[in-house]
Structure formats: structure tokens, C-alpha cells
Amino acid sequence: MPGIGVVKNLDEAAGLVKNVIKNADLEEKVAKNVLDKVDEFMPELKRSMDSPDIAPLLGNAMKSSDEAAGVGKKVGKSGDEVGKGIEDAVSDSDILIDTYKNMRDNPDIVGQAHHLNQNAAFKDIISKNDGLCVELEGNAFKNIGSPHYSAHKNLENYWNNFRTKGHLYGDIPTISNYNSALYDSLRAAGLTDTQAKIAVQSAIKQQSKYGLSGGSLVPKIPGKINFKK
């Protein structure tokens, strides 16, 4: 029968479109409208295949197929975007956090181990080797503009408030206040919002392990760092 190949191909196309739509995260209303359109033109096309008026009908069918294919392309694009979003999220949360001792002995560490609970402030409570760290590139005191340098430079501005001539001189900040400054310093070092928050949460867990709460006072105000200028 003339046109049977067309019907078979259109059947396959319709099936593919349906599968794409069913597996895609489209709004229910849009998906239903497209599926209804596919189901609507297919029976009519089959019944009228021998009709002399088939050409106009085929034209309408192909138009509907094009519309369905257009939706399929949009679905594919949306799927790619979702995939990229997931990939970015995984990358965004990818951050190594370990003790100073483990990071120091890790041959894969390219940068330096940066204490989350700054050693100069917490060493009387949390030992240097046990302190949790993140990897930051650059020398903290010499490589101007490096992530490690930038983190300490930002934190120094915070500590200066509590040092001689600082407007909070004589006060001791709370752990909660320090954690806010820690977040800012990690962002200054180039960590993403997600990475910085993950790091701060790790610092808080370690503080809690050693008996420090958000309302506790920071053990010590660190001495001033002499940065290379």
C-alpha cells in the first residue's frame, strides 16, 4: 500500500518524541499538549492514506511532527543545562579538608595547608597537627595576591579591630564572630560560597569537639603578621 513506509517512520518518530517527553522534566501541561497532538494526527493519517487528499493531510502531519521535534530539541537542551548544573554543583562542593598533619604528609597537595581554626588563635585548645585545614595555593606571607596570602590578609584586617589602636581593643571576639570572619577570608581566597560554607561547618564541628560553642570566646588574639609588601 502506498505510504505505508511513511506511516511506519512517523510511528517511530512519534514513539521517540513520546519517550523524550516522558523522560524529560517538562511542565505537565506542555507535555500533555504535545502528546495529545501526536495522538490526534496519527489515527487520521492511517485512515486516510489511500485518499486523493492525502497530500494536504501529510503536510499538516509533518507540520505537527516538526512542532513535536522542536519540543524534543528544547527538551534535549534543557537536559543538557540540567546536566551542566549538576556538574557545576559537584565541582562547587569539591574541597579537600583534612588535618594539618595529613595534608602536610600528602604528596598530592600542591599548595599549603591553611588552618580553618587559625593556629595562632586556637593552638592552646587545638594542636597544630590536629587542626583542620584546606589547601590554598601560595605562601601565606610572601606570595602577594595568592589565595593563601589573601586569606590571611583578610583575616588580619579582622584581628586588627581587637589589637592596639583597634576600635574593639580590649574585647575578645566570640567563636561565632570568628567563624563569620573565617567565611569572609575564605571567600577572599577565591573559594565559592558553597566551599566556604562547607569549610566553616567543618571548623565549627571541630570547635564543638574541643568544647567550644558559638558563644565561647576565641582562645587568643594572634600577634600581627608582617606581610611582604
Image (cartoon, rainbow, N blue to C red):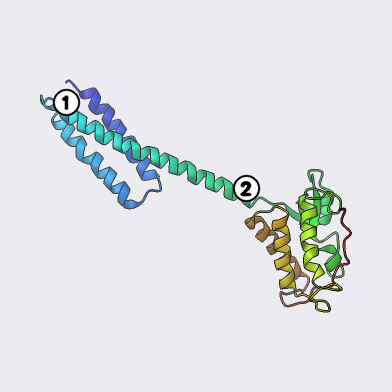
Q: Is residue 117 visible?
A: no
Disc count in the image? 2
The residue shown at (75%, 72%) is 175
The image's mark for residue 134 is: none
SS at mark 1 in the image: helix
In the image: residue 54, left or right of residue 146: left
Task: Please provide percent x and percent y for residue 78.
Answer: 44, 44
Placement of 47 over or under 84, stated as above or below: above
The residue shown at (21%, 29%) is 59
Which amino acid, by three-letter code, is at mark 1? Ala
Residue 53, quarter of picture: top left
The residue labelled by disc 2 is 91
C-alpha separation, residue under disc 2 versus residue under disc 1 = 53 Å
Which amino acid, by three-letter code, is at mark 2? Ser
Q: Earlier in the sequence, mark 2 or mark 1?
A: 1
The one nearer the camera, 18 or 159, is 159
Q: Is residue 179 visible?
A: yes
The one nearer the camera, 163 or 140, is 163
Task: Please provide percent x and percent y for residue 151.
Answer: 77, 57
The image's mark for residue 55 is: 1
Task: Please provide percent x and percent y for residue 131.
Answer: 81, 61
Residue 56, quarter of picture: top left
In the image: residue 226, left or right of residue 146: right
Residue 156, quarter of picture: bottom right
SS at mark 2 in the image: helix
Placement of 116 over or under 21, stated as above or below: below
The residue shown at (78%, 65%) is 157
In the image: residue 9, left or right of residue 219: left
